[in-house]
């Protein structure tokens, strides 16, 4: 009897091994792929948009692919495969892809060369913002300008460089001038690497209380910015400040350390503009199977195990949660940690 099950077990195991190997193959193809030459940069990509007509279109936003590490590249390649199929129903044109930065693992020349290969795999024009991991000189060489505006149909796009952490006075002047210009368009979108708020409050990234972030958010509200896109934290997060949508889309490939339930998953965002309407969808992409068995399964298992005996937080201590009744606040339980 047991031998009969063992036989089926072997078949299932063999199929699993085959599937794991199969999930690795796109990466092998990528390694042998030619064409990391610098054919497209921000200027040439933006130029391709000039002839676009009509007020019904889509674009894709992703971030933090961190090209140059095997795990990251395999995930990004899978995301690109999905991006390239976004227009399969021919309902709405996908005009371009916007990256919110950290295109390289560590800013090295070979990482940029890798990113250029990624760019070649994407069938739409690619516009790239700079991230804190991207060397400034090499970014200029491979991707072009790091701060600029461009127009696509009825929408105005502002790309900012806040890779150093905050926006300078000069950048605020630039931003407000451009926001004024953008007023004559139906929509304004902003892309920059670091979010002007804390997408994950327990994480070390602490920007919510920074003066520049507050000032930036108020400025976006004043000029009715539609969406601010950023990355930096490897997760998806949506917040609204004064009617302005803020989307953190840092799930473009980098190994994700944040729990999936809190937004720590691979994804990109597809935005649709239909005249005066703007909508978006988050495309959650499952990692390649070989990454699930070597990393993602164990990441989630670790949080699950930690939740069994204490805090499931990333950097949490193992403390007992105690409910606390706060006086003056009705029917609210707060938790002391
Ligand atoms: Fe990053």
Image: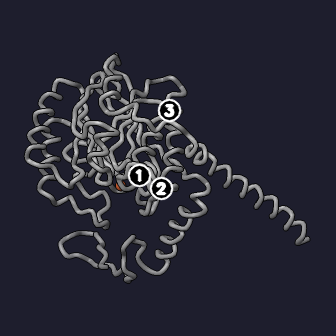
Given residues 201 and 48, the one toward you in this image is 48
User: What's the distance in space between the residues labelled 2 and 1, CA to CA?
Assistant: 7 Å
- The secondary element bearing badge 2 is classed as loop
Q: Quadrant of residue 17?
A: bottom right
Specify whether 268 is left or right of 186. right
Q: Specify few, some or many for label 3: CA neighbours under 10 Å numbering under 14, 14-19, or 20 or more.
A: some
Q: Is residue 136 above or below residue 7?
A: above
Quadrant placement of the N terminus:
bottom right
Residue 236 position in % (x across, y down) = 38, 51
**Tag 1 residue:** 66
Name the residue at 69% across, 52% down: 19
Q: Quadrant of ligand 1?
A: bottom left
- Number of the front mark, 3 or 2: 2
**Tag 3 residue:** 86
Residue 232 position in % (x across, y down) = 32, 54
Name the residue at 31% across, 33% down: 42
Given residues 293 and 247, the one toward you in this image is 293
Q: Specify few, some or many for label 1: CA neighbours under 10 Å numbering under 14, 14-19, or 20 or more.
A: many
**Tag 2 residue:** 69
Labels 3 & 2 near each other (Cβ < 8 A) = no
Given residues 291 and 195, the one toward you in this image is 291
Q: Is residue 69 above or below residue 182?
A: below
Q: Is mark 2 within 8 Å of ligand 1?
A: no
Q: Is mark 1 within 8 Å of ligand 1?
A: yes
Q: Is mark 3 within 8 Å of ligand 1?
A: no
């Amino acid at each position: 009897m047991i031998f009969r099950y063992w036989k089926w077990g072997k078949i299932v195991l063999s199929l699993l091994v085959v599937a794991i190997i199969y999930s690795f193959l796109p990466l092998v193809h990528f390694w042998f792929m030619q064409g990391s030459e610098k054919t497209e940069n921000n200027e040439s990509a933006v130029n391709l948009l000039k002839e676009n007509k009509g007020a019904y279109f889509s674009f894709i936003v992703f971030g933090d692919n961190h090209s140059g590490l095997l795990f990251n590249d395999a995930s990004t390649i899978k995301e690109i495969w999905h991006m390239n199929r976004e227009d399969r129903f021919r309902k709405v044109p996908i005009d371009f892809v916007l990256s919110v930065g950290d295109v390289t693992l560590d800013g090295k020349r070979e990482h940029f060369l890798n990113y250029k290969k990624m760019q070649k795999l994407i069938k739409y024009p690619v516009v790239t913002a700079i991230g804190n991991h991207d060397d400034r000189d090499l970014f200029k060489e491979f991707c072009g300008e790091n701060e600029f505006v461009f127009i696509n149909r009825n929408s105005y796009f502002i790309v900012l460089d806040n890779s150093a952490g905050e926006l300078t006075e000069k950048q605020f002047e630039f931003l407000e001038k451009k926001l004024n210009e953008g007023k004559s368009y139906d929509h304004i979108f902003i892309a920059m690497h670091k979010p002007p708020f804390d997408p994950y409050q327990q994480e070390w990234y602490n920007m919510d209380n920074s003066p520049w972030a507050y000032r930036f958010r108020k400025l976006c509200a004043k000029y009715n910015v539609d969406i601010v896109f950023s990355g930096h934290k490897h997760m998806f997060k949506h917040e609204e400040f004064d009617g302005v949508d803020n989307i953190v889309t840092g799930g473009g490939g980098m190994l994700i350390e944040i729990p999936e339930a809190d937004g720590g998953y691979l994804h990109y965002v597809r935005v649709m503009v239909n005249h005066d309407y703007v909508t978006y969808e988050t495309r959650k992409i499952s990692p390649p199977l070989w990454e699930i068995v070597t990393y993602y399964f164990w990441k989630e298992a670790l949080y699950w195990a930690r939740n069994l005996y204490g805090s499931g937080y990333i950097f949490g201590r193992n403390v007992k949660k105690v409910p606390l009744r706060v006086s003056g606040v009705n029917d609210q339980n707060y938790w002391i940690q």
